[in-house]
Image (spheres, grey):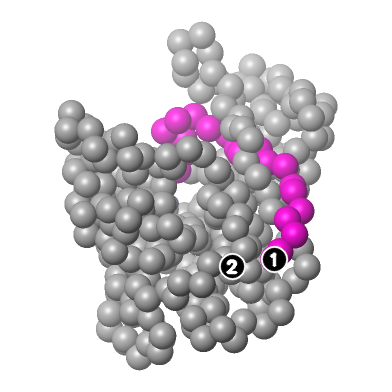
């Protein structure tokens, strides 16, 4: 494992302006700083998309969490609000590739019953041990992996990062249970970093199962591109369960069902409200086992 200590951690909320849990958890930490006062590293808080928060929207011009490719940050022709924010955030906690902060924890919510979903973009020992540490100490934790070249996620500005996505909670709402789980996950991540910095980490599990995304299913549309059906009740709320070939996934307005044809896979973000802007119905992943250490 890399030996550098984690000195500075940015906890980010409101990357999506209508995901209130992270935003108000930051408020809580501001007001009661003793709740998170690690000994071995500094914490700073960042409200990523204040304008979208003010308007109770996910974003104004484009999804901020899809705006952090190096190519985009450097592109002077991209001038929307989120592109400007991406540049500011990159100046503030980055620059990406040589960031001032050592780690970013980005707090999100889902309208789907995802439980506590930890999202990684890499699977080195540090990150595997981190998610294993949380999963061993908390119920209902799943880990997913979304790898890509020059990643578009905000958190990838720092080399080390994890996204905490908790659901179900509607957009623009605080829900006690979801808030509590998010807070608990943040506390466990902070605890892990303390142990890591002090070389006092307990023995990790031998391996961990991670869901790796490979695709997205789009809602059914007519030739004009209008939605012409909905997610089938057969798969509603079946997040992180297996979808088998032949199962109904959509119920069309004409009364017919549409069935899944393809390899069996794990589905999540099923009927996620935030995904209607792109007409996405659910995400598809494959479970892989990673050896730790
Ligand atoms: Zn989000």
Disc 2 under 8 Å from ligand 1? The reply is no
Name the residue nearer the viewer: 61 or 128: 128
Q: Quadrant of residue 20?
A: bottom left
In the rendering, at what x and y percent does residue 50 appear?
A: 23, 56
Q: Which residues are magenta?
A: 274-293
Q: Is 45 displayed left or right of 234 in the figure?
A: left
Which residue position holds label 1? Answer: 293
For residue 119, say whether it is visible. Answer: yes
Q: Quadrant of residue 150?
A: top left
Q: What mark, if any, has residue 1 been given in the picture?
A: 2
Q: Is residue 283 magenta?
A: yes
Residue in the image at 61% along x and 33% along y: 215
For residue 140, say whether it is visible. Answer: no
Name the residue nearer the viewer: 141 or 198: 198
Density class for disc 2 (Cα within 10 Å; few <14, some 14-19, many ≥20) is: few
Quadrant of the image containing the N terminus: bottom right
In the rendering, at what x and y percent does residue 254 appear?
A: 64, 17
Q: Is 62 displayed left or right of 131 in the figure?
A: left
Disc 2 and disc 1: Cα gap in Å? 8 Å
Residue in the image at 22% along x and 47% along y: 87
The answer to whether 238 is drawn above or below residue 226 in the figure is: below
Residue in the image at 37% along x and 76% along y: 7
Task: Pick whichever of labels 2 and 1 is earlier in the sequence.
Answer: 2
């Amino acid at each position: 494992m890399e030996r550098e200590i984690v000195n500075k951690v940015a906890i980010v909320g409101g990357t999506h302006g209508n995901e209130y849990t992270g935003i108000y958890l930051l408020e809580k930490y501001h007001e009661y700083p003793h709740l998170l006062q690690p000994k071995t590293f500094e914490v700073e808080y960042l409200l990523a998309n204040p304008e979208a928060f003010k308007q109770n929207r996910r974003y104004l011009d484009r999804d901020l969490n899809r705006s952090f490719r190096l190519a985009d940050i450097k592109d002077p022709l991209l001038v929307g609000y989120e592109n400007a924010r991406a540049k500011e955030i990159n100046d503030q906690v980055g620059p990406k590739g040589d960031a001032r902060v050592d780690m970013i924890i980005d707090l999100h919510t889902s309208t789907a019953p995802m439980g506590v979903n930890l999202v990684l973009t890499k699977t080195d020992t540090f990150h595997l041990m981190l998610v294993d540490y949380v999963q061993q100490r908390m119920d209902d934790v799943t880990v997913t992996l979304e790898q890509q070249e020059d990643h578009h996620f905000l958190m990838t500005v720092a080399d080390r990062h994890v996204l905490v996505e908790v659901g179900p909670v509607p957009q623009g709402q605080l829900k006690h249970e979801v808030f509590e789980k998010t807070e608990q996950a943040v506390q466990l991540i902070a605890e892990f970093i303390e142990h890591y910095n002090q070389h006092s980490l307990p023995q990790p599990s031998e391996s961990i199962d991670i869901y790796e995304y490979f695709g997205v299913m789009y809602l059914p549309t007519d030739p004009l591109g209008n939605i012409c059906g909905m997610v089938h009740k057969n798969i509603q709320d079946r997040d992180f369960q297996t979808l088998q070939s032949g199962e109904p996934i959509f119920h069309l307005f004409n009364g017919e069902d549409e069935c899944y044809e393809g390899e069996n896979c794990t589905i999540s973000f099923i009927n996620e409200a935030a995904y209607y802007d792109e007409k996405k119905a659910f995400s598809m992943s494959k479970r892989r086992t990673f050896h730790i250490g």
